[in-house]
C-alpha cells in the first residue's frame, strides 16, 4: 500500500530548500524524530505472518489437489504455508522499506512499516503502510520517496514470479470445474510463456503458492501506481507534472469507475478511489517548488514506473470461472 503523507499545503520555513536550490539538488530535511513503538510494528507483523500462513496453507492444499479434490487441512501443511506467506511479506516489506529508507535518506520523519493482518482466504492481509509525519518539501524528494516503494517491491516480485511459475505445473481442467480465474498481467503472460510455452487446449497452469504471492505482488504494485490521490502513482504524477496532475487524477478516477463496469473485482477499488477524491480533494498537496521540473534522470524513472504499471496491470484481476454445464 502507499505511504500516508500529510494532506496540507506546504509552507517554506527557514532552513528548508527554496525552489531555486531544489531545482539543483534535493537536500535532507533536518527534523526532530518522534518516538517509535517497535512493539506495535512487531505485533502487527507477527499477526500478518499468522494470517498469511493460514491463507498459504489453503493455497497449498488447493495446489496439491490439481483442480480436483482438495486434501484435508492438517498441521502437516503448516510448513507449506510459508511458500505464500514469506513471499508476500517479502514483497510488501520491500515495498514499504523502499519508502522508509528514502525518507531516512532525506531526514524525513517516517514510521516503520505497519503490516495489516486480515483473515481473508485469498490474501491473508490488506497490505502494509508507513506513516510520514511531516510534509515533503520538494518534488524531487516526493518523487524519490514515492517511486522507491513500487520499484523495490517490483524487483522482488519478478524473480518470485519466475520461481513460482517454475514450481507450478500445467494440468487439465476438470469438466465440472468451478473456481476463480486470475487475470494475467502482461508480465505474467510473458513469464508463463517463457517457463511453460503455450498450454494445451483444456489445460491451465496450476499456480504454486509462491507464484500466487508474486501475482498478488504485481497487482498491488499496479494498484499503488494508479496516478491518483495519495497513492504512490499520485505522488509520482504530481512530481512529474505539477498542477497538471490534477486532470490526470480525475481522469484516472473516471477510468477506475469504468473498470468497475467491466469487472466486479474493481468495485471496491473504485469506491476507495472516489472516497479519496471526495475527502482529500483531486489536487495533490503542493510542494514549495511546484513549478520546477524534474531533472532528466527522474523523468526517465517516471517513465519506467509507468512501464511497470502497464506490465503489472490486468483489466479483470479476479473472475469466477464456472465450467459446469447448465441443465
Image (cartoon, rainbow, N blue to C red):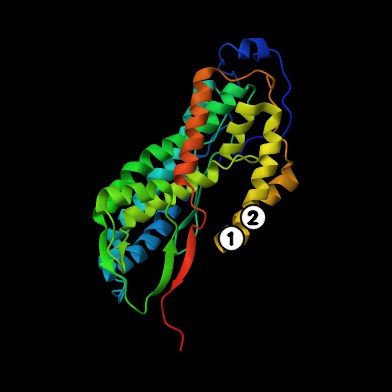
Q: Give residue 133's quadrant in the image.
A: top right
Q: As drawn, is 184 to the left or to the right of 200? A: right
* Residue 108 visible in rendering: no
Q: As drawn, is 198 to the left or to the right of 324? A: left
> Quick one: SS at disc 2?
helix
Which numbered circle lies on residue 224? none
* Residue 77 visible in rendering: yes
Q: As drawn, is 130 to the left or to the right of 83? A: right
Whole-percent x, y for residue 222 in the image: 50, 45
> Quick one: SS at disc 1?
helix
Q: Nearer the viewer, residue 51 or 179?
A: 179
Up/down of 178 relative to 276, above or below: below
Up/down of 150 relative to 220, above or below: above
Whole-percent x, y for residue 226 in the image: 57, 43
Whole-percent x, y for residue 143 in the image: 56, 27
Q: Nearer the viewer, residue 316 or 31?
A: 316
- Residue shown at 47% from the left, 37% from the top: 307
Q: As drawn, is 292 to the left or to the right of 114? A: right
CA distance for labels 2 and 1: 7 Å
Q: Residues within 10 Å of mark 1 (few under 14, many from 20)?
A: few
Whole-percent x, y for residue 129 in the image: 53, 43
- Residue shown at 48% from the left, 42% from the top: 310
Circles 2 and 1 in contact, beta carbons < 8 Å: yes
Up/down of 25 relative to 7, above or below: above
- Residue shown at 47% from the left, 29% from the top: 101
Q: Residue furthest bottom?
A: 327
> Where does label 2 land, which residue?
258
> Where does label 1 land, which residue?
262
Numbered-mark total: 2
Amino acid at each position: 500500500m502507499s505511504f500516508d503523507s500529510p494532506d496540507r499545503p506546504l509552507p517554506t520555513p527557514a532552513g528548508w530548500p527554496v525552489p531555486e536550490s531544489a531545482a539543483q539538488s534535493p537536500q535532507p530535511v533536518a527534523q526532530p524524530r518522534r518516538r517509535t513503538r517497535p512493539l506495535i510494528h512487531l505485533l502487527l507483523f507477527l499477526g500478518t505472518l499468522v494470517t498469511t500462513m493460514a491463507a498459504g496453507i489453503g493455497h497449498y492444499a488447493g495446489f496439491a489437489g490439481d483442480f480436483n479434490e482438495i486434501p484435508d487441512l492438517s498441521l502437516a501443511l503448516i510448513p507449506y504455508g510459508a511458500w505464500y506467506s514469506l513471499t508476500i511479506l517479502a514483497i510488501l516489506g520491500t515495498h514499504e522499506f523502499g519508502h522508509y529508507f528514502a525518507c531516512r535518506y532525506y531526514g524525513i520523519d517516517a514510521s516503520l512499516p505497519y503490516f495489516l493482518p486480515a483473515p481473508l482466504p485469498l490474501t491473508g492481509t490488506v497490505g502494509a503502510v508507513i506513516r510520514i509525519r511531516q510534509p515533503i518539501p520538494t518534488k524531487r524528494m516526493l518523487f524519490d520517496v514515492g517511486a522507491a516503494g513500487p520499484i523495490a517491491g517490483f524487483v522482488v516480485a519478478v524473480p518470485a514470479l519466475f520461481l513460482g511459475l517454475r514450481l507450478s505445473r500445467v494440468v487439465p481442467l476438470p469438466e465440472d470445474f468451478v473456481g476463480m480465474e486470475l487475470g494475467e498481467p502482461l508480465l505474467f503472460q510473458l513469464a508463463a510463456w517463457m517457463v511453460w510455452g503455450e498450454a494445451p487446449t483444456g489445460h491451465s497452469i496450476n499456480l504454486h503458492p509462491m507464484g500466487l504471492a508474486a501475482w498478488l505482488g504485481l497487482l498491488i504494485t499496479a494498484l499503488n501506481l494508479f496516478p491518483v490521490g495519495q497513492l504512490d502513482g499520485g505522488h509520482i504524477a504530481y512530481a512529474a507534472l505539477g498542477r497538471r496532475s490534477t486532470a490526470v487524477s480525475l481522469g484516472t478516477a473516471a477510468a477506475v469507475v469504468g473498470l468497475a463496469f467491466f469487472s466486479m473485482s474493481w468495485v471496491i477499488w473504485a469506491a476507495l478511489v472516489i472516497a479519496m477524491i471526495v475527502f482529500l480533494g483531486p489536487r495533490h498537496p503542493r510542494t514549495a517548488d511546484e513549478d520546477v521540473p524534474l531533472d532528466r534522470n527522474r523523468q526517465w524513472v517516471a517513465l519506467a514506473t509507468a512501464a511497470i504499471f502497464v506490465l503489472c496491470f490486468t483489466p479483470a484481476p479476479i473472475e469466477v470461472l464456472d465450467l459446469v454445464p447448465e441443465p
